[in-house]
Image (cartoon, rainbow, N blue to C red):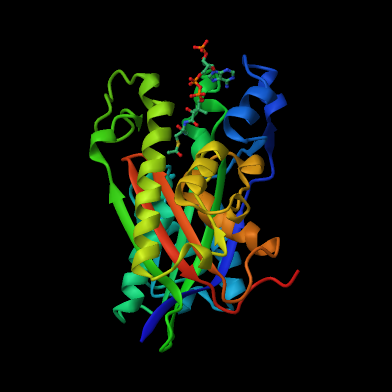
Amino acid sequence: MLHAQITGWGKCLPPATLTNDDLATFMETSDEWIRSRTGIGQRHISHVSTSALAAVAAKHALAAAGIDGSDLDMIILGSATPDTLVPNIAATVQAEVGAQCAAFDINAACSGFLYALGLATAQIRSGQCRRVLVIGAERLTFLLNWMQRDTAVLFGDGAGAVVLEAVESDEPTGVLSYAMNNDPQARDILKVAAFGSDMDRLSPDAANFQFQFEGREIFKRAIAGMSALGQKVLAESNTALDQVDLVVPHQANVRIIDTLIGKMGLPAEKAFINIENYGNTSAATVPIALCDALEQGRIRPGDTLLSCAFGAGLTSAAAVIKWGDRVIPV
Ligand code: ACO
């Protein structure tokens, strides 16, 4: 039977950082407020495009998998902040890595990486593709109004990528199960109102190019959406709670992660949390967290991972992954 296994991973965080104390020099906020509400300590700020971040992460992932761009059958890139709408920026990454294959972007906001992982898994299981590059990349600071303290403190820039390869095995391995959903009733609670073909080209309103959101409503719906899909993918893969070795959740807010873990009945120490260093990098949080977990020795051969995400839409997605034998020895 064909399974989709992660064989390579890579990340790219731009070198410039803004700490909470840096932000407090020009807006009414404090390290104490931001840390206690969100868990964020600093964020990385990019001076280059989303595709440039994605290409670096992609090259690391290919190198870790020991394959070339020319070996790829497909590139799927999740992003809500592509540098160009036409062409898609998966094509830009494709040119950078020297691939000749299908390449496209998807916009499922912060769930974009897990949506892309699910699509890639289906391609591999069906035999259509043997090697798919899956990327989550964002330059969210482009959309921030640095004078709007409720949103400016939350987000950061970055990219992460994995190589997903077909493996033949009688035993289930790799992506064991995945699920995606969307809650359209909540499509207006998190938005960039008119940055697209709906925008007024003659008298654009700057307020429409920045985040508008209802934090508390998102908080509630995020927990409900992620825990429902988390339970679904655990059930579909016959994975009991005590078989989960590590939870790699979307990093939007440490309190959301704590509440999710508690609601699902998982021990707090099973959650991997790195939001302190990066803020919310949307579609990039999960692949960056995978890289960090590997670098810290938190993922061992054969481990079972649960990943959950939510984002504008409100999208939600989840996956259970049985890790292969490739880890970073620490
Ligand atoms: N510094 C200091 N004070 C602030 C800041 C800031 N950066 N931002 C807001 N405040 C003030 C508000 O003005 C408000 O003051 P007031 O009571 O005098 O009116 C007070 O702090 C409380 O504001 P709330 O918005 O009620 O704060 P809350 O406790 O709900 O925390 C937060 C806000 C962190 C955004 C929370 O709602 C949350 O985590 N929501 C879910 C995550 C989220 O929405 N992320 C963005 C979407 S991205 C995604 O991943 C899908």
Residue 291 in sight from this viewpoint: yes
Q: Position of residue 5 (x, y in %)?
A: 47, 75
Q: Position of residue 304 (x, y in %)?
A: 52, 69
Q: Position of residue 59 (x, y in %)?
A: 57, 65
For residue 124, above or below residue 203: below
Point out the residue furthest to the top here: 28
Q: Residue at x 64, y 57 (%)?
A: 292
**In the rendered image, which quarter contains the N terminus?**
bottom left
Q: Is residue 78 left or right of residue 277?
A: left
For residue 151, above or below residue 327: above
**In the rendered image, which quarter contains the C terminus?**
bottom right
Front residue of 185 and 112: 185
Residue 107 in sight from this viewpoint: no
Q: Residue at x 37, y 29 (%)?
A: 217
For residue 225, above or below residue 116: above
Q: Position of residue 35 (x, y in %)?
A: 65, 30
Q: Answer with the quarter of the image where residue 124 lies.
A: bottom left
Front residue of 261 and 41: 261
Q: Residue at x 50, y 26 (%)?
A: 151
Point out the residue furthest to the right here: 330
Q: Residue at x 33, y 21 (%)?
A: 204
Q: How many marks?
A: 0
Front residue of 280 and 231: 231
Q: Is residue 280 left or right of residue 42?
A: left
Q: Is residue 196 left or right of residue 53?
A: left
